[in-house]
Amino acid sequence: MKNSKLIPLIVAASLFTTSCENMSPGENAAVFGGAAAAITGGVLVLAGVDPRLAIPIAAGAGLLAGGAAFVVSKQQATARQRQIALQNARAAEARLLAQQRATKPTTRSTGSSVAKKAPAQGVPKYIAVDTVAQPQSPSQTKQQMVYDTETKKLVGNTVYNVKRTPSPGSSVKYDTMTAKYVGQ
């Protein structure tokens, strides 16, 4: 019976967040932090946890979710952002392939045994590249898009507005995929 009370809360939260794509990082933080706090608090109260304990836990969950949402927001890409991201992605992929060829394993004969160089690092499936900001882009953020090196296309039409730029070569989570950040 307790689960039946939770379903309307989940449906309401889902409907509430369906149009969050073009919001600023601060707006995303407020929406997702508030939703996380409400859901966490609701679940704890339904589970029978004392409200004096549930409130601080829910507030903490809201702060964590709000902080994570503040770091990355997203918006629809313009044609110019797609064009720049695609140029940057193709150039970065060419650099990665050149690096891979430069470290490609080779064999050389050393008497009766064969010595090999270390195996080359493969080009990752997803790479994240920088693109240009638009007037509607949140201030003090870096705009990034994700490129699929197998299909040779940008993944979706989403620009990620990143508050803290990752270091080149690091792995970054964008929605459901992990991409290697290569910058420009």
Image (cartoon, helix red, strand yellow):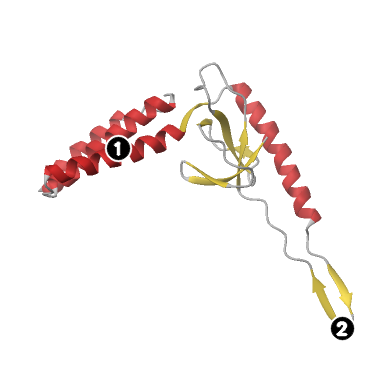
| Residue 4 shows up from this direction | no
Q: Say if mark 2 contacts mark 1, CB within 8 Å.
A: no
Residue at the spot 68% in from the left edge and 55% down from the top edge: 122
Residue that label 2 marks: 112
x and y percent of residue 63 in the render?
Answer: 32, 37
Judge by depth and name the residue closer to the eye, 142 or 10.
142
Q: Which mark is residue 62?
A: 1
Q: Is residue 49 above or below residue 87?
A: below
User: Left or right: 33 with respect to 43?
Assistant: right
SS state under label 2: loop
Answer left or right for 26 relative to 150.
left
Residue shown at 65%/45% (left/top)? 149
* Quarter of the picture holding the C terminus: top right
Taking the spot 35% from the left edge, 39% from the top edge, the residue there is 65
Q: Is residue 112 above or below residue 25?
A: below
Q: Position of residue 110 (x, y in %)?
A: 88, 78
Q: Amino acid at mark 1?
A: Gly
The spot of residue 52 in percent (x, y) is 13, 43
Numbered disc in front, either 2 or 1: 1
| Disc with the residue nearer the chain's start (2 vs 1) | 1
Q: Position of residue 64 (x, y in %)?
A: 35, 40
In the current view of this chain or complex, which residue is farthest to the bottom? Answer: 112
Q: Amino acid at mark 2?
A: Ser
Residue 54 visible in this rendered orientation of the protein? yes
Q: CA distance from mark 2 to mark 1?
A: 65 Å
- The residue lying furthest to the top in this view is 135
Return the residue nearer the eye: 152 or 178. 178
Residue 70 in the figure: left or right of residue 83: left
